[in-house]
Structures are given as structure tokens and as C-alpha cells.
Image (cartoon, helix red, strand yellow):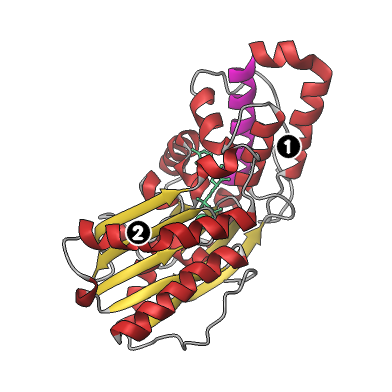
């Protein structure tokens, strides 16, 4: 089965063609970073307008790259939430129009389910059940993934998402946008133990996360030491901040694994493309007898291949969504 995936929940306009839920034939992304950079964050109105401009060319490119025509597609998978409602509507309306005109079914996919299941696009993937940690710009949520479609929430952030903390700290330090990738790059030349930033709720017996305290600690650090010092030691500062976030994430993964006796762990979402998190997860897993899995970086950040993979699963069971399916900005898993 050939599925066209469409993803437009935030600032990435993406399309992909996936065969039988596992083989990525094409994977096209138009990033809006340049549009939003000058504002230091995603401007929803501009995002939806740009999706309108780019969605058709991006789909055309994905079809061309897969060396086929739209007539070859068996079904369409599209993100219908959570995300920015204007952006979601562009992808969803396009999927409905294509579904209607081509006479093929479409399936509305939860973006978080896409992140959780992206690992099945890799050659190495876990058996069920596994602990699935989604770390993105909007979410930091831990689930027990029992099987496809059965997700037990174990913990989530009580304030900022991990990616949001990266982006806000980068802004605070005047490093530019988008913050996560910039901090990742600068931190590679820094000492992660140079400064001590708080780990979120380390001693508490909860699987929830919190990142606003780390962000506030960086804010007071800058106020205390001043701009010149921050500029001179920026690599050490971001490496130390990043270490605090990574420790906070991994502490909860270890706690969940011990509590529920689950040895397989999948970490995904934009922050899972962070090189330090990837390295430390593998080290911690090796030291604790866990089996860790992380999708390749391009399948961690927003993409349409993960949406196509999830859509394939449901479409191949004969399921489809109705043409009156609405976008849901606050969709939960
Ligand atoms: O999953 P994603 O692409 O979009 C959402 O669903 O939110 O995640 C975007 C988030 C942003 O906050 C971005 O700064 C962060 O992922 N991010 C990173 C890295 N690359 C992207 N954070 C840390 N290190 C990175 N290399
Ligand atoms: Zn995402």
C-alpha cells in the first residue's frame, strides 16, 4: 500500500510517500524558519499563509521524488492535531480535497502518535510494550506504548516543554532562532559541568517533568554575571543548561523503567535530535540494561513520513476518516 503523508501542524510543511508503513520512498519538507526567525518564534498567521503557498508544491515534489503519480496513491494520512489550528486546516483541507477527487480514503493522524511510532520507519525497532518519550517544542510526555493505538500516559510536563526551554534559553542568551539546534551546536565546544543548573524534580516520586525552573535559573544567571561574562562563557553555559535538561529527561525514563519493569525505551520528537541526549541515552541504557531506540534526526523533527506510517496502519485495517473531520488544536493522545 502506498500512502501519502501530509504534515502541517506547526512551521514545517511536509509530505512523504511511504510504502507498506515502513519504507520511505520520499520525504519532502519546506521549512518556514526564515519567515519566523525575525520574530524569534512561530507567528501562527504567517505559518498558515505559508502552508497555503507551499502545500501543493511540497506534495508534488514528494510524488515526483518517489517517481510516481498521484494516481498511484492508495490512501492519504494527514495530521489533524494537536498544533496551530490555521496550519492544521491547510493540510487537512488539502488531504480531504485529494481524497475526494482521487476517490481514495484519508485518515486523520494524531501528531503525537506520529512521533511515538516514527521508530517503525527504522530498520531497528522495539517489540511492545515500550516506554515512549515524546520531547518536542510543544510536548514532553511519557507513555507506556502497549501496542499500536494503546498509549498509557505516565507523565508530562507541568509547565514548559523541553524544546520550549531550549528555544526560550537561546532567546534569553541572544543566540537566535530556532534555539534547540543552535544550543546543540554551541554546546559541543562547552563543558557540561562548568555550571550547575537545577534538575527538574529529581527527588520526587513523580514521572512528570518541569522545565520552567531551569529556564528561570538561566535568567537569574545572566542577571547575576552580566552580558560580557555570558558572551565569553556561552559554550559552557549552554552545555551546562543542556546537561540539566538531558539529566531531567533521563532520570524520569529510568524511574519509569524501574517502576513498570519495561526495558524498551523510545525517545522521539524534535529534541530527540539533540546530539547530547542521543549520546547520553545510549550510555545510560547500556549501564542500566535498557534497550534504547531513537529515530534518525530527520525522523525526530516534524516530518510527514511518520504521519504516513501511522496512517498506513489504520488505513490497511479498512479504517478512514469522514470528510467532516475537523482540526483539533488541543488533541490529546
Ligand atoms: O517535534 P518538533 O520538530 O516540533 C513540534 O512538534 O514541536 O520539535 C521542535 C522542537 C523545537 O523546540 C526545537 O528547538 C527542538 O525541537 N529541537 C532541538 C534540536 N532540534 C530541534 N532541541 C535540542 N537540540 C536539537 N538538536
Ligand atoms: Zn512534532
Q: Tell me the residue that label 1 is attached to.
A: 215
Residue visible at 48% across and 75% down in the picture? 93
Residue visible at 73% across and 37% down in the picture? 215
Magenta span contains residue 65: no
Q: Residues within 10 Å of mark 2 (few under 14, many from 20)?
A: some
SS at badge 1: helix
Q: Which quadrant, please, contains the N terminus?
A: bottom left
Residue visible at 53% across and 53% down in the picture? 11
The mark found on residue 57 in the picture is 2
Q: Nearer the viewer, mark 2 or mark 1?
A: 2
Tell me: 205 left or right of 282. right
Q: CA distance from mark 2 to mark 1?
A: 39 Å
Q: Main secondary structure of the magenta part?
A: helix
Q: Which quadrant, please, contains the C terminus?
A: bottom right
Is residue 7 in view? yes
**Which picture quadrant has residue 199?**
top right
Amino acid at each position: 500500500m502506498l500512502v501519502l503523508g501530509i504534515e502541517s501542524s506547526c512551521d514545517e510543511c511536509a509530505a512523504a510517500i511511504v510504502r507498506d508503513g515502513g519504507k520511505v520512498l520520499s520525504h519532502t519538507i519546506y521549512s518556514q524558519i526564515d519567515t519566523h526567525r525575525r520574530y524569534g518564534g512561530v507567528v501562527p498567521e504567517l505559518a498558515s499563509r505559508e502552508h497555503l503557498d507551499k502545500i501543493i508544491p511540497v506534495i508534488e515534489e514528494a510524488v515526483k521524488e518517489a517517481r510516481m503519480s498521484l494516481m498511484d496513491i492508495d490512501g492519504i494520512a494527514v495530521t489533524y492535531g494537536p498544533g496551530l489550528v490555521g496550519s492544521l486546516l491547510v493540510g487537512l483541507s488539502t488531504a480531504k480535497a485529494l481524497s475526494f477527487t482521487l476517490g481514495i480514503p484519508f485518515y486523520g493522524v494524531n501528531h503525537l502518535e506520529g512521533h511515538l511510532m516514527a521508530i517503525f520507519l527504522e530498520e531497528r525497532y522495539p517489540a511492545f510494550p515500550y516506554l515512549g518519550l515524546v520531547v518536542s517544542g510543544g510536548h514532553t510526555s511519557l507513555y507506556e506504548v502497549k501496542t499500536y493505538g494503546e498509549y498509557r500516559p505516565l507523565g508530562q510536563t507541568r509547565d514548559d516543554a523541553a524544546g520550549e526551554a531550549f528555544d526560550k534559553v537561546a532567546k534569553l542568551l541572544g543566540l537566535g532562532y530556532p534555539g534547540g539546534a543552535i544550543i546543540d551546536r554551541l554546546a559541543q565546544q562547552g563543558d557540561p559541568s562548568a555550571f550547575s543548573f537545577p534538575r527538574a524534580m529529581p527527588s520526587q516520586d513523580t514521572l512528570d517533568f518541569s522545565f520552567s525552573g531551569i529556564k528561570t535559573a538561566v535568567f537569574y544567571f545572566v542577571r547575576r554575571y552580566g552580558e560580557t561574562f555570558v558572551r565569553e562563557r556561552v559554550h559552557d553555559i549552554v552545555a551546562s543548561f543542556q546537561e540539566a535538561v538531558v539529566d531531567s529527561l533521563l532520570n524520569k525514563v529510568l524511574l519509569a523503567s524501574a517502576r513498570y519493569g519495561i526495558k524498551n525505551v523510545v525517545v522521539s520528537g524534535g529534541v530527540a535530535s539533540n546530539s547530547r541526549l542521543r549520546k547520553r541515552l545510549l550510555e545510560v541504557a547500556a549501564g542500566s540494561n535498557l534497550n534504547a531506540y531513537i529515530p534518525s534526526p530527520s525522523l525526530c523533527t516534524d516530518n510527514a513520513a511518520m504521519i504516513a506510517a501511522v496512517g498506513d496502519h489504520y488505513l490497511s485495517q479498512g479504517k478512514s476518516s469522514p470528510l467532516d473531520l475537523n482540526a483539533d488544536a488541543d488533541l490529546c493522545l
